[in-house]
Amino acid sequence: MSAQEFLIQKAAKTERAMAAYCDAWGSVPETLGQAIRYSLFAEGKRLRPALVLGTAEIISGDDAVALPASCAIEMIHCYSLIHDDLPAMDDDDLRRGKPTLHKVYGEAVAILAGDALMAMAFDIAAQCSDVRILREIAQAAGPAGMAGGQVMDLESEQKRLSLDQLRLLHWRKTGDLIRASVRCGAMLACAQDAELAALTRFGTHIGLAFQITDDILDVVGTEQALGKPVGGDAAHGKATYPAVVGLERSRKLANESVAAAIDSLKPLGPKADPLRELAWFIVERKS
């Protein structure tokens, strides 16, 4: 199975579960419910859910145990995109080829939709009946993770960062939640200590590779493929890998990160091949 087929399969499973969860939530104001669905079911790679489910399947042969975590992490990711697009943040007009949520429903509803998705994420994560999963997601999304990374990103605009500073920024902003995706799948599948350690290393390296590739695509990608205008990072004066080390070295660092990720999977043998395929997909993708 190719990485693309794997992503499609896991995305379909996650989307069915998220739709059922939204339907069962109860009495929700119509506008808020529409806004949540507008963003949550927009086209996307669903990489994080695929990592949750794929890792669980590799360890235990079954991904069902990790389905609530895959939904929760995708909801966290979605809420972060809604808030990231707001005028106070990146002020983006397009996301995944559609007008951003605040352009359709207004800033206030967009903020509240993001807030609601975060709350829904922790409600569904609690269905795992494993406090480790709640803490893993909270720490990845919180002040020392994604939220902190976003602040660092804002404060770095128009500044020249060192490579180490940039790596830390991107790790918190993007990498932490990607690593958490891998770790949640492994923990829910009852991975052994050595397996969890190997997968944690894998998640760390692909999280970095993903963000470097995102930075590269904002320079060389197309609006049609990305679903949003290119060049936004440069326009905002953001610290990115191409801005700090140039395109060629950025590509080299992305490939090195993927190679390190794949090397981390050696203890798992051939059963980890789907993750190896995903790792290469991350740096070879066009969107």
Image (spheres, grey):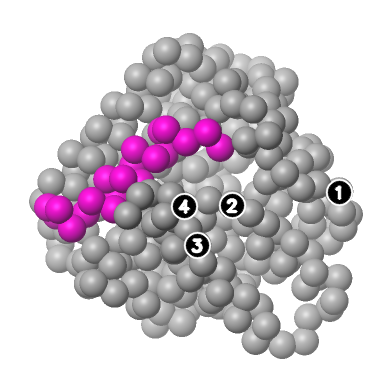
Snapshot quadrant of residue 209: top left
Does residue 127 appear left or right of residue 184 in this picture? right
Q: Tell me the residue that label 1 is attached to.
A: 103
Q: CA distance from mark 4 to mark 2?
A: 8 Å
Which secondary structure class fits the magenta region best? helix
Task: Name the image quarter holding the C terminus.
Answer: top right
Q: Is residue 27 above or below residue 187?
A: below
Residue 279 in the magenta stretch? The answer is yes
Identify the mark nearer the N-term, 2 or 3: 3
Q: Are marks 4 and 2 in contact (CB under 8 Å)?
A: no
Residue appearing at x 79%, y 64% in the figure: 35
Residue appearing at x 73%, y 66% in the figure: 36
Identify the mark nearer the N-term, 2 or 1: 2
Q: CA distance from mark 2 to mark 1?
A: 19 Å
Which sits in the foreground, 23 or 165? 23
Residue 209 in the magenta stretch? The answer is no
Q: Are marks 2 and 3 in contact (CB under 8 Å)?
A: yes
Label 1 environment density (alpha carbons within 10 Å; few <14, some 14–19, many ≥20):
some
Does residue 226 appear left or right of residue 242 in this picture? right
Q: Position of residue 179 (x, y in %)?
A: 37, 50
Q: Tell me the residue that label 3 is attached to.
A: 11
Label 2 environment density (alpha carbons within 10 Å; few <14, some 14–19, many ≥20):
some
Does residue 274 appear left or right of residue 35 in this picture? left
Identify the mark nearer the N-term, 4 or 3: 3
* Residue type beneath disc 3: Ala
